[in-house]
Amino acid sequence: MKIDAHQHFWQYDAEKYSWISEEMSAIRKDFTPEDLLPFLSKKGFSGCVAVQADQSEAETEVLLKMAKNHDFIKGVVGWVDLASPEVEKRLKFYSKSPFLKGIRHTVWDEKGEFMTSPEFQQGISFLANLGLTYDILAFDYQLGGAVELVKAFPRQKFVLDHMGKPQISGKPDKQWVDHIQQLAAFPNLWCKISGLVTQTPHFSWKTSDFSPYLKVVADAFGVDRLIFGSDWPVCLSAATYSEVTGAAEDFFSSYSKADKEKIFGRNAAEFYNLK
C-alpha cells in the first residue's frame, strides 16, 4: 500500500491562510479531494493522510467528514487547542472518529518555546492514551524545542514534518544536522520526507540539491522511520506533484523494493495505524 502521508485540503480564504505569500500565489484557490485523486492514482498511491492547515476545530470536522466520504483519505491529522483547559474533553470527543489519527499545531514563536510550555505539554500528555500521534511542525531554528518535547514524552509517537524545514541551499547547516541526529536518537520519533521544494531559494531547485539533506535523515532515522509525504498543494508553488514524488523516488532508487515500500507507505500505515 502506497500512502501519501502529508497533504492538505482547503477552501481558500486570504485572512485564514495569510501564510500563503505572493510568491505562492499559485495555491491561492480551493483544493478538494477530487483535485488530488488523479495525482494519487497516476503515481500509484492507494491513499493519503489529510493534515490540518488551519488552527480551528471547524477544519478538523471538515477533514473528518471528507475522510468518511472518500475511501482514499485513510486518516486525518487534525487540530485542537492543546493549551486549553478543555483539551482532554475535546480530544476524547474527536477521537471517537476512526479517521482521527493525530494532532498538529502550527503556531510558531521565535525559538519554539510553545513546545516546552506547561500548558501545551499538558495537552500532549493526553494523546498517547487515546492512541493519537503528534506531528511536529517546526522551523530548523526551533528544533531545540522539539528535542525537549520528544524527550519529555517517551511513550508518545511523534513525527517531524518536512525534515525540520532546513534551508535547502548548498551544504546542510551543521546545527540542523546536529538536531536531526539528536531527534533520531529517540525511538518514538519518525521523520517525514516532505516539504523540501518550498524550502529552496525562490523555489528554484534541481533534484540533486536535496541529496545531502536526504542523506542526513536517511542515515539518522534508517528506513523504518522515514515517511514520504507530498505536501500537496503547498508543493505546487515550486513543483508539480510528479516532480515532488520523483525527487524522492530518485534518491531512494538504489534501495531495495522492501525498503522503498516502507518509506512510501508501510511506515505511514504503521505510524498512523491506517486500515
Image: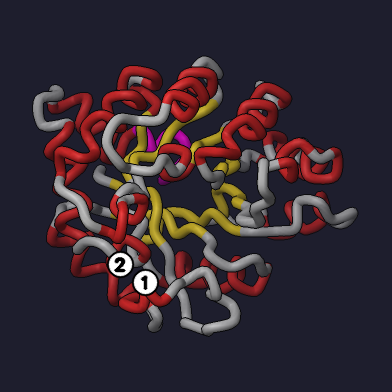
Q: Which residues are magenta?
A: 267-275
The residue depicted at 54 percent of the width and 54 percent of the height is 77
* Left or right: residue 11 compared with residue 130: left
Mark 1, secondary structure of its residue: helix
273 is within the stretch colored magenta: yes
At horizontal 17% and vertical 45% (from top left) the residue drawn is 247
Callout 2 touching callout 1 (CB < 8 Å)? yes
Q: Looking at the image, is 259 positioned above or below residue 139? A: above
Crowdedness of circle 1 by 10 Å Cα count: few (<14), some, many (20+)?
A: some
Residue 21 visible to the viewer: yes
Mark with earlier residue (2, 1): 1
Q: Amino acid at mark 1?
A: Met
Q: How many marks?
A: 2
Identify the residue shown where x is 36% and y is 26%: 217
Quarter of image, res 138: top right
Q: Which residue is mark 1?
A: 24
| Residue 4 visible, this orientation | no
Identify the image quadrant of the N terminus: top left
How far apart are labels 2 and 1 at the CA level?
A: 5 Å
Q: Which mark identifies residue 237?
A: 2
Q: Nearer the viewer, residue 92 or 171?
A: 171
Q: Residue visible at 65% across and 65% down?
A: 55
Magenta region, mostly helix, strand or loop?
helix
Q: Position of residue 2 (x, y in %)?
A: 25, 45
| Magenta stretch holds residue 228 | no
Residue situated furthest top in the rendering: 185
Residue toward you, 151 or 1: 151
Which three-letter amino acid code belongs to the residue tagged 2?
Ser
The image quadrant of residue 143 is: top right
